């Protein structure tokens, strides 16, 4: 990857041997590997037997999960918050596992729409809950730094499965819980 980055620098009109750029191919390579580490991670290993039999049938919500990903169209970052809610069906997952699953799926080249669906479908496949809802609110540098150059646009996507899709009251409860107590960050 370092050779490719050196070549990219040359094609951009830069000198990779210039003092400030000498270590850039190594640093950029390490950075890209970190930003796409989700390709090398396994959701099953992350769950690590963190599923528990519990008689609980009310909504579980983990909100304001930080999301950092790379747009697959421009290789520029998008970032924001993810909110995940589910209604258990005799199984719950360790709460820290939800942000970890979000991170694994986000640390791949993505589009926000697909990321929302992947999170919902992954958790649905593991938990088999009564329903699940995922909402992502993100800013895209591909919209902010280039193209339209719109600085304050926030993209919101959702994926609803089970009762979150079929029952308007459940969906509204989820959306209201996301909005209540929301920070102004």
Image: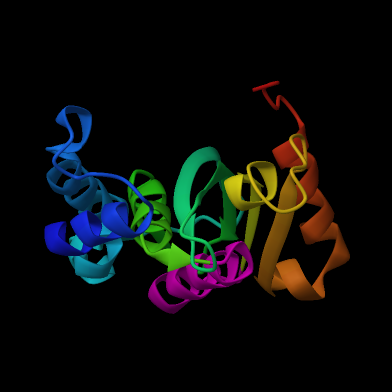
The image quadrant of residue 135 is: bottom right
Residue at horizontal 19 percent and vertical 45 percent from the top: 16
Left or right: 140, with 50 as reference point:
right
How far from the left and from the top, in percent, is residue 146? 65, 49
Could you tell me if residue 90 is visible in this image? no
Left-right relation of 152 to 43: right
Could you say which is closer to the camera, residue 38 or residue 18? 18
Does residue 140 belong to the magenta stretch?
no
- Residue toward you, 142 or 91: 142
Q: Residue at x 70, y 59 (%)?
A: 157
Quadrant, the C terminus:
top right
Residue 78 % position (x, y): 54, 48
Quadrant including the N terminus:
bottom left
Q: Residue at x 78, y 59 (%)?
A: 170
Residue 118 among magenta residues: yes
Left/right placement of residue 116 relative to residue 176 reads: left
Residue 29 visible in the picture: yes
Identify which residue, 54 or 37, lies in the foreground: 37
Magenta part, dominant SS: helix
Task: Give residue 118's position: percent from left, percent from top.
Answer: 50, 72
Question: So how many labels did they put on this image?
Answer: 0
The colour scheme of the drawn protein is rainbow
Question: Residue placed farthest to the top in the image?
Answer: 184
Q: Is residue 184 left or right of residue 122?
A: right
**Relative depth, front residue between 100 and 95:** 100
Magenta segment: 111-131
Residue 90 percent location from the top left of the image: 45, 66
């Amino acid at each position: 990857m370092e050779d490719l980055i050196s070549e990219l620098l040359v094609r951009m009109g830069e000198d990779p041997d210039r003092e400030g750029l000498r270590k850039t191919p190594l640093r950029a390579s390490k950075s890209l590997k970190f930003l796409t580490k989700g390709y090398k991670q396994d959701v099953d290993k992350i769950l690590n037997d963190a599923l528990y039999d519990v008689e609980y049938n009310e909504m579980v919500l983990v909100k304001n999960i930080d999301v950092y990903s790379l747009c697959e169209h421009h290789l520029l970052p998008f970032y924001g918050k993810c909110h995940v809610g589910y209604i258990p069906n005799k199984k719950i997952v360790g709460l820290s596992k939800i942000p970890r699953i979000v991170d694994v799926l986000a640390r791949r080249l993505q589009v926000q729409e697909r990321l929302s669906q992947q999170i919902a479908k992954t958790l649905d496949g593991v938990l088999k809950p009564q329903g699940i809802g995922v909402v992502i609110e993100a800013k895209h540098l591909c919209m902010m730094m280039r193209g339209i150059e719109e600085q304050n646009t926030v993209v919101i996507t959702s994926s609803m499965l089970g009762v979150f899709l079929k029952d308007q009251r459940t969906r509204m409860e989820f959306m209201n819980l996301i909005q209540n107590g929301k920070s102004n960050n």
